[in-house]
Amino acid sequence: MASVDRKEDIIQPGFIIRERWKVRKKLGGGGFGEIYEALDMLTEEQIALKVESTLQQKQVLKMEVAVLKKLQGKDHVCKFIACGRNDRFNYIAMSLQGRNLAELRRAQPRACFTISTTIRLALQLISAIEAIHSVGFLHRDIKPSNFAMGRLMNTQKTVYMLDFGLARQWVGNSGEVRQPRNVVGFRGTVRYASISAHKNKEMGRVDDMWSLFYMLVEFIIGQLPWRKIKDKEQVGIMKEKYDHKSFLKYLPSQFHPFLSHITSLNYSDTPDYSFLRGLMYQGMNARGIKDDDPFDWEK
Ligand SMILES: Nc1ncnc2c1ncn2[C@@H]1O[C@H](COP(=O)(O)OP(=O)(O)OP(=O)(O)O)[C@@H](O)[C@H]1O
């Protein structure tokens, strides 16, 4: 979500937080905050700082901190370093990752990834989504710019999940699926939203999987049919009319059971993450794809 009216940045390069983190440069400004690269003067490591103005209407950093803390120790998750606030902004410090998957795709010659890269990313993306679901939360904004590759020798083959600002708890106090609300405001990003999210229905774990499916289709084909349409309602109508099976002719055959599986799920169902990963492994075997083959951007 790019904000339209560009206000002044919350912090400037050179600014030091708690005598420890020196801001270097702005990496991006999303819908709900700004991301900076900073130097941890204690450890000499580069880190990422996400900041949110205290004046902002919708405060989401608190959710971000809660979910990131719950996810610590799992794969595909940034290291939580610290969080805090002052009179001007709230901030969270976490490990710094490399380029996000939207940037990496757009940098490819035909703006698409090979089947090999897509399938191996899919394996990691399924596990990342399973991880957030396993701690009781939905992500609700699964999209390529919310995943980044690591930037260090030992992390550059790993996908990291970003941005838990729209997360919501799906599990109730006794481990049951929370009762769905009848109508909810739309959350997420139009291009990757599930049909049910377009209809303002309560999202479940399946809706994160739908967004993943749209991501993977876009990776392979290089675009989605509704890419140029801004209007949320129109995109919703288009998705409803669109025969999703027609994507399959461009995709490895394993995407047929992938699509059938997510189509079969309802709000309260648990996706079969292992089954979906199994399909991706089948696709790798059928095509002689190896775990450690280079990704498209490494070639
Ligand atoms: N830990 C990180 N390391 C490196 N880059 C990051 C990190 N966190 C976020 N970014 C970059 O900043 C961008 C925006 O981050 P994030 O999605 O968390 O913010 P946001 O304000 O919710 O943005 P949006 O509304 O676009 O999703 C990401 O696409 C990513 O490129």
Image (cartoon, rainbow, N blue to C red):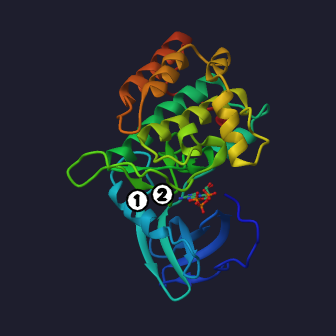
For the N terminus, give its image quadrant.
Answer: bottom right
> Which residue position is annotated with label 2?
164
Q: Which of marks 2 and 1 precedes in the sequence? A: 1
Crowdedness near tag 1: few (<14), some (14–19) or many (≥20) residues, C-alpha within 10 Å: many
Residue 89 image position (x, y, % from top left): 54, 81
Q: Quarter containing ligand 1?
A: bottom right
Nearer to me, 238 or 16: 238
Foreground: disc 1 or disc 2:
2
Residue at 45 percent of width and 23 percent of height: 261
Where 12 falls versus 141 (above or below)?
A: below
Q: Going by the image, does 136 lie left or right of 280?
A: left
> Residue 132 has which mark?
none
Residue 173: quarter of image: bottom left
Residue, far left: 174
Q: Is residue 280 visible?
A: yes
- The three-letter code of the residue at mark 2 reads Phe
Residue 6 image position (x, y, % from top left): 76, 72
> Which residue position is annotated with label 1?
68
Within 8 Å: ligand 1 and the Cβ of disc 1? no
Q: Is residue 299 visible?
A: no
Residue 44 image position (x, y, % from top left): 50, 69
Q: Going by the image, does 73 lie left or right of 109?
A: left
Q: CA distance from mark 1 to mark 2?
A: 7 Å
Residue at 50 percent of width and 67 percent of height: 60
Residue 54 image position (x, y, % from top left): 54, 81
Q: Helix or strand or loop: what does disc 1 sit on? A: helix
